[in-house]
Image (tube, grey):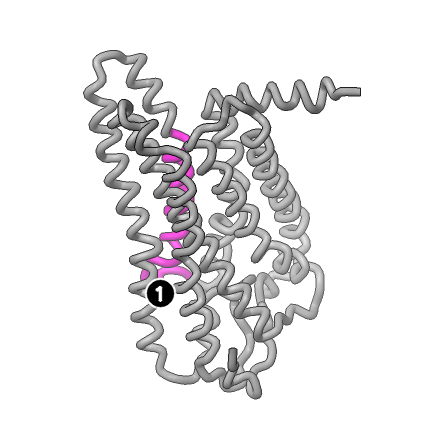
């Protein structure tokens, strides 16, 4: 890859939360604890689903992959942010910034489509239960997951390569805690209209299109649930998708506050705070949401802890 403007800008400075030095010292232990809980919680979700035979269903297959994506998503941005909270040298190399942006786009895209795949799984399970085993089979799940992991590569590569081949004329201070596209784009010293139009199109396809699929799925799910004759049946059907619905709301709600609002609405500092929610807070909450609201997951966690922790084999 040829970085044609590398002679002018060889590294970037991530300003992060430098404007509030006392706040950095307070943020570090808080964000470190959240990050460790995020990684531990999602690893636990993956482990429990792998070892418990009762969780070998498509719904938990997708949940396991969502947990893995959350780990990768936070790994891309949070360690760098934690280091920068402690040190004065907050530089990141030109190529390192490009790689971080690519990974951010890629895992964000993967999460959107995994959430859409999970909503389709719940749609078939509730609206067409007789066909569930036929439609959502192992082969279909692996093909769908393969598509999820592959679809984000070209657009993420295009976004990163395009923006980092634009001319940077000496300004290298990124007003964010990671290399996100909007603050990096502000450092470009040429017209960025074409890139912005491409970015809007990509946002629609890879952020809003999965959201629309999720919305359509849940419109049908809710319609089917309301037609069920018994309260117990409605409650059971809703409980199988309530955790996923909360996770979707948290993810899209926090991301839309940053990316789908007019530029003048929030100051850079407010945007950084909002970005913390979808980069670190939401990934931490997801394991708790599934553990607390899903009865099968709760029972599986109890069994796993009892067998593997409190009653280890000698």
In-image side of 197 versus 169 (left or right): left
The percent position of residue 152, horizontal first and vertical second, equals: 41, 58
Write down the residue under mark 1.
Answer: 263
- Residues in magenta? 242-266
In-image side of 254 versus 124 (left or right): right
Residue drawn 34% across and 37% down?
Answer: 119
Of helix, strand and loop, which one carries label 1? loop
The percent position of residue 212, horizontal first and vertical second, equals: 26, 46
- Residue at the far right in the pictured view: 314
- Answer few, some or many: residues within 10 Å of disc 1's Cα (few below 14, many 20 plus, some between 14 and 19): few
Seen in the picture, residue 241 relative to 88 is either above or below; the reply is: above
Foreground of the two, 86 or 198: 198
In-image side of 150 versus 291 (left or right): left
Secondary structure character of the magenta stretch overall: helix
Foreground of the two, 292 or 112: 112
Label tally: 1
Residue drawn 67% across and 19% down?
Answer: 307
Foreground of the two, 123 or 78: 123
Quadrant of res 138 = top left
Quadrant of res 193 = bottom left
Seen in the picture, residue 18 relative to 31 is either above or below; the reply is: below
81 in the magenta segment: no
The percent position of residue 303, horizontal first and vertical second, equals: 60, 19
Residue drawn 49% across and 43% down?
Answer: 282
């Amino acid at each position: 890859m040829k970085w044609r403007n590398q002679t002018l800008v060889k590294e970037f400075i991530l300003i992060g939360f430098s404007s509030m030095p006392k706040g950095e010292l307070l943020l570090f232990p808080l964000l470190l604890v959240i990050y460790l809980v995020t990684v531990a919680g999602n690893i636990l979700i993956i482990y429990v689903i792998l070892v418990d035979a009762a969780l070998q269903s498509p719904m938990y297959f997708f949940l396991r992959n969502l947990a893995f994506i959350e780990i990768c998503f936070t790994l891309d941005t949070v360690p760098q942010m934690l280091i920068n909270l402690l040190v004065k040298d907050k530089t990141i190399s030109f190529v390192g910034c490009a790689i971080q942006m690519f990974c951010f786009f890629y895992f964000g895209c993967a999460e959107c489509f995994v959430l859409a795949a999970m909503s389709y799984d719940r749609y078939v399970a509730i609206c067409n239960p007789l066909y569930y085993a036929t439609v959502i089979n192992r082969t279909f799940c692996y093909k769908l997951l393969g598509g999820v992991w592959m679809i984000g590569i070209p657009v993420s590569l295009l976004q990163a390569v395009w923006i980092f081949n634009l001319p940077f004329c000496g300004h290298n201070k990124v007003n964010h805690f990671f290399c996100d596209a909007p603050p990096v784009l502000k450092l470009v010293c040429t017209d960025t209209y074409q890139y912005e139009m491409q970015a809007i199109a990509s946002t629609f396809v890879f952020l809003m299109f999965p959201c629309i699929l999720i919305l359509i799925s849940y419109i049908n799910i809710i319609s089917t649930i309301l037609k069920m004759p018994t309260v117990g049946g409605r409650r059971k059907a809703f409980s199988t998708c309530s955790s996923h619905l909360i996770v979707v709301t948290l993810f899209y709600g926090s991301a839309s506050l940053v990316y789908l609002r007019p530029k003048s609405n929030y100051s850079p500092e407010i945007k950084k705070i909002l970005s913390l929610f979808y980069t670190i807070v939401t990934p931490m909450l997801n394991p708790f949401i599934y553990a607390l609201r899903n009865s099968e997951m709760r029972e599986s966690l109890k069994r796993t802890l009892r067998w593997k922790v409190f009653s280890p084999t000698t």
